[in-house]
Amino acid sequence: MNKTHKTKTDSRRIEANRDHAMRLCDKVKFKELSEPLFDLHIDFDLTPEQDFQAPDYWISSKDAQRKHGLSSAIVNKMHFGSGTSLPTGVRDLHFRGTENACWDIIDAFSMHGEFRISKISVYSVESYDVGDDTDNDELRSAIQRFYKRKAQRSQRTMKKGKN
């Protein structure tokens, strides 16, 4: 084997390796970054006249749905718990959702609710939630579908208004 033949063989092998690498690279698909989920905790200072369950009932009511714009199904999926805050002893509600959905809940309570809010805390779910993420993924997908359909309905009504 002469030097020219060896060089030719090496370059063919290198080209074949590169071709193979490119075929493998073409198959790589990165998972789309999904919207992060947040845990939203709202603590309330209820007056003696207000029922302990009043914030729960109100956020699921038709009146609240008109205020926050979320469907009752989405609010029920987002509602992760309620009770009494152990450190403070006040009424608290816990929601999990995307940033937009959490803001809709916050806005509903702060601008339209009749309850005094003592504290609002927000934590990133991905920062501490380890293990099976299927529940989180399902919740995220449901919220994203809701907002997508809401945007589509809005566009349809705008088109109808122009006609």
Image: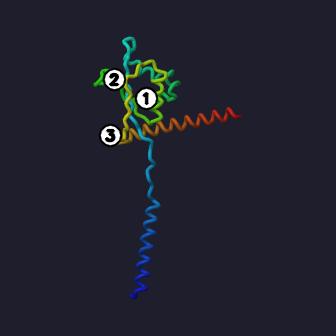
Q: Position of residue 96 (x, y in %)?
A: 40, 33
Q: Position of residue 53 (x, y in %)?
A: 38, 18
Q: Which residue matches tag 1? A: 76
Residue in view at x 41 percent, y 19 percent: 116
- For numbered disc 3, what is the local secondary structure? loop
Determine which of the numbered discs, if any, sits on residue 128 in the image: 3
The quadrant where residue 49 appears:
top left
How far, Cα to Cα, is label 3 from label 1?
A: 23 Å
Residue in view at x 38 percent, y 28 percent: 120
First in residue order: circle 3 vs circle 2:
2
Determine which of the numbered discs, if any, sits on residue 58 in the image: none
Instruction: Give yes or no for contact between labels 3 and 2 (Cβ–Cβ under 8 Å).
Output: no
In front: mark 3 or mark 1? 3
Q: Position of residue 147 (x, y in %)?
A: 52, 36
Q: Which residue matches tag 2? A: 83
First in residue order: circle 3 vs circle 1:
1
First in residue order: circle 1 vs circle 2:
1
In front: mark 1 or mark 2? 2
Q: Amino acid at mark 3?
A: Tyr
Q: Position of residue 52 (x, y in %)?
A: 37, 17
How far, Cα to Cα, is label 3 from label 2?
A: 22 Å
Residue in view at x 44 percent, y 81 percent: 8
Q: Amino acid at mark 2?
A: Gly
The quadrant where residue 1 appears:
bottom left
Looking at this view, name the residue that lies furthest to the bottom: 2
How far, Cα to Cα, is label 1 from label 2?
A: 16 Å
Looking at this view, name the residue that lies furthest to the left: 87
Image height of 35 relative to 112, above or below: below
Image height of 158 relative to 112, above or below: below
- For numbered disc 2, what is the local secondary structure? strand
